[in-house]
Each structure stands twice: as structure tokens, then as C-alpha cells.
Image (cartoon, rainbow, N blue to C red):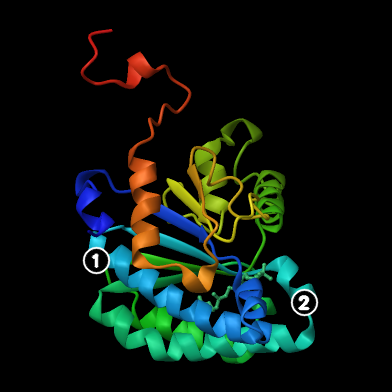
Amino acid sequence: MSNLNHIALNNLPNHIAIIMDGNGRWAKKKGFLRAFGHENGTKSVRTTVEACAKLGVKNLTLYAFSTENWNRPKLEVETLMKLLVSSLRNELPTLQKNNIRLNSIGNLSLLPSSIQKELEDVISKTKNNTHMTLTLALSYGSREELLNVVKKISDKVKNNIISTDAIDESIINQHLYTHDLPDVDLLIRTSGEHRISNFLLWQIAYAEFYFTEVLWPDFTEENLYEAIISYQKRERRFGKTSEQIDTKSTK
Ligand code: FPP
């Protein structure tokens, strides 16, 4: 029986973020080049996006390419870039059919112009879609993002646009790439690694973490459901006591 039947649709994570890991190992295990793993990884992207949309998850963010990934062999970077362009081109009908808005975060100016153009095109064509926001983290690094926030706010203080006293969490949120997204509720990482790898460090402050041994190209709808079920079994206290957050409690 599918795990789908065990998901409480009234308690879905509002924002799921995924570190899609294990493409290279998946390919190597099968005796293929790493590129084959990335190609098959795109299938899991499609499955996951459609499954989230079907369930009613409002925000899905995928770590597709980190600032550190630029240091990979040139051929692998080129393969990933080509895959991204072709995926964006091919997935537009799926995004439209499912009423999904595409969004992107990261230092996009470093991406090849072909990707920037394709991204702009899909982002603009899907900008009025309302069912779900799919965010691709591309050339993204959380420390770089936070560094930019510090610089932008410092400039505003220097130019008397805001005062130091006015700097609060909401001002920081407004200057992040993710300014129009809610905090992450559920962070999933595949492939058995237990690391954050410079992903959404500010935004995951109260996220629930879910690590699975499954390599990203093997990640299925059922694996997504398992992660959501695990999330739904947890008590999110946000620093409070169990009694305080139990709405049925008289305390
Ligand atoms: C990590 O696996 C994966 C990536 C660095 C890239 C993720 C990209 C895709 C899934 C394909 C295209 C994406 C979209 C959004 C269409 P790894 O190469 O680090 O694997 P390893 O740890 O086994 O070496």
C-alpha cells in the first residue's frame, strides 16, 4: 500500500528543501560516467516536483548547483549546465499544467547566458502560477548570500536609509535571495550524507531534517511520502515546551 494514505494533508510542510545528492555514486555503481547520474537525477526532479504539486506542498526548493560546484571538472560543469537548459525548456509544459511558478536563487550572473535566458523565459511565463513555487538554487551558496545581505544593509545604514537600531530579522529576510519564500519546514538530503553544505543556513533555523540513504536518481514519490510522514510525526516546539505547544493542554 502506498505511504500516500498515511499523509495528513492538513499538516503538510509549507516549504520543503532538498539537497539532491548521490548522482555520481549512482552512476559509478552501475559502471557509467557521472553525467549519466545527473541525467537520471533530472527524472527524480520531475517526479518530486509533480508529487509535491499533487499533494499541495506550496514551496519546493532544490539545490541544483552550489557555488562550490564550479570547482568540479569542466566537463561535468558543462554537462550539468546543458541538462539545466534542456530541463528548463522541456519542463515548461509540466510547470504550466501543474500551475507551478518557477523561481531561482543564487549568483545567477555567473551562469552561462543560455541558462540565464532560459531561466528568465520560464520564470516570466510562469510568474502568475499560484499552486506551488519551485525554486532552483543555482550557483547558490548560503555564506555568499549572507555576505551580500550584510553588504546591502551596511550600504543602507551608510546612506541613512535605515538606522542600525531598525535592523531586525525581518530586514534580514527582506535582503535574502529567498525574500518572498517562507522558512524551510522540512530539509531532505539523499545519499546518506549528513551535511548542510552551505544551503539555506538562515532559512533552516527551525527546519526538521530528514536524511535518507537513497541516492538521488533512485528517489521516488514513495521516498518523498516517507520523508513527509517522518516530519508529521515530530513535535515542532520552536524553543517552547511540549506543554506550551499542545493546544489541547490546559497549561
Ligand atoms: C549531487 O550529486 C547533485 C548535483 C551536484 C546536481 C544536481 C543536479 C541534478 C539532479 C540534475 C539537474 C537538475 C535540475 C533542477 C533539472 P553528486 O554529483 O554530488 O553525487 P556524488 O556525491 O555521488 O558524487
Question: Crowdedness of circle 1 by 10 Å Cα count: few (<14), some, many (20+)?
Answer: few
Question: Between 26 and 60, which is closer to the camera in this rendering?
Answer: 26
Left or right, residue 138 beside residue 188: right
In space, the residues marked 1 and 2 are separated at their CA atoms by 35 Å
Residue 110 pos. (x, y %): 69, 78
Residue 14 seen: no
Question: How many numbered markers are drawn?
Answer: 2
Q: Is residue 38 visible?
A: yes
What SS does tag 1 mark? helix
Quarter holding the N terminus?
A: bottom left
x, y (%) of residue 91? 38, 85
- Contact? badges 1 and 2 (CB < 8 Å): no
Which residue position holds label 2?
A: 72
Distance from mark 2 CB to nearest ligand 1 atom below 8 Å:
yes
What residue type is disc 2 on?
Arg
Give me the residue at 79% from left, 82% from top: 73
Name the residue at 36% across, 86% down.
Answer: 92
The residue that label 1 is drawn on is 54
Image position of 115 with respect to 241: above or below: below
